[in-house]
Amino acid sequence: MAYEFKLPDLGEGLTEGEVARWLVSEGQEVAEDDPLVEIQTDKATVEIPSPAAGTVRRILVAEGHVVPVGTVLVVIEDAASAEEADWSIRVESVPSAETVPEGPSPTAERVRATPLVRKVAQELGVDLAAVDGTGASGQITEADVRSAADTSQGRSLSAVQEGRREPLRGVRRLIAEHMAVAHREVPPVTWVEECDFEAVDLKLLVATVLKACAAALQEHPELNAQLDGNEIVYLDRYDLGVAVQTEQGLVVPVVRGCDTGSLDEIAAEVERLAAGARAGTLRPEELRGSTFTVTSAGKLGGLFQTPIVNYPEVGILSIGRIAPRAVVRDGEVVVRPIGTIAVTFDHRVVDGARAAEFGLSVIRRLEGAEAA
């Protein structure tokens, strides 16, 4: 007897997933609940165990392919079964990798493209059926669509195809899609001001900023909000995302209850989440539901940044490089640890004056050590 394992519904409205890594190979014996495959969604990487014991007879979706929920990923044959099936026929019946059917058109069902790419094609008036995909297994990328649009408008595409190429996949693919949505949807403005960090224990920098932001957000609720159609949703929780750089790309785990947690509790949670993000062990629920985001690149942060809003949030705060600088205090030149605080905000929801007031509120708390 053979078991056809399909990509399960991972919740949160997710309709597709990318096969990030197979943890088994064809012909391998597996026990029930043995690690089977890692699936990358737009929320997290999830390790899925084998639902049955037996022999991995056929892997039907290769690593790096994006498929809709319900697609058969692998066939596991019962070890007790002596039946030898012709799996080559079954392979042909499995939906093509990275194909997300849309509408009744047979042509559309054969096109390999993500929903984001389909939306871009619709906006640019490009027929996906006429586009040759350069992505993995012929997947049509956003660059393919834009090139086709350029060609249709008579622009020259004389660039030489050279250099090493690799598919856009995994966390990097998700980052690219998320940033493209944010850039397309959000009209951003960035406000920047200096901050004296003399009163802040730099070992607890991120936790202190999170605590200060949570307090300031209570005074400026429009920055702790989301835009849902024609409605602004003001959130009454303060679950703040923290941008963490990993080898795979940028991950934003969520620190819950920054308004009620103590500084030590928040610092411990930041450390735990950052370690989990770098190890790739965070649960999906630890990566969703943030209401505002804080990012700091430490010594690599430069003088200041203009961060991109973590859509569908409406604001993000970044910490620039903190270094000794000469400043004037009480009419005297002194050396203080000075850095910058930058706030990027969605101008559809937040006015410039309110964003500035929020930033100054955060700075006052940091300079007065009120966050502790």
Image (cartoon, grey):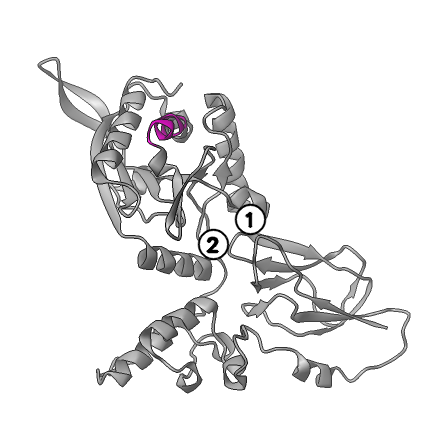
Name the amino acid type tagged 1: Gly
Name the amino acid type tagged 2: Gln
The residue that disc 2 covers is: 248
Q: How many marks?
A: 2
Q: Residue furthest front?
A: 230
User: Where on the picture, by quarter, is residue 26?
Assistant: bottom right
Q: Residue at x 51, y 85 (%)?
A: 107
Label 1 crowd (10 A; few <14 / some 14-19 / many >=20):
some
Q: Mark 2 or 1 closer to N-term?
A: 2
Residue stretch in magenta: 211-220
Label 2 crowd (10 A; few <14 / some 14-19 / many >=20):
few
Q: Main secondary structure of the magenta part?
A: helix
Q: Secondary structure at mark 2?
A: loop
Q: Residue furthest left?
A: 331
Observer-nearest residue: 101 or 200? 101
Q: Identify whether 355 is placed above or below 141.
A: above
The residue that disc 1 covers is: 280
Q: Identify whether 233 is placed above or below 121.
A: above
Residue 207 visible to an observer of this rendering? yes
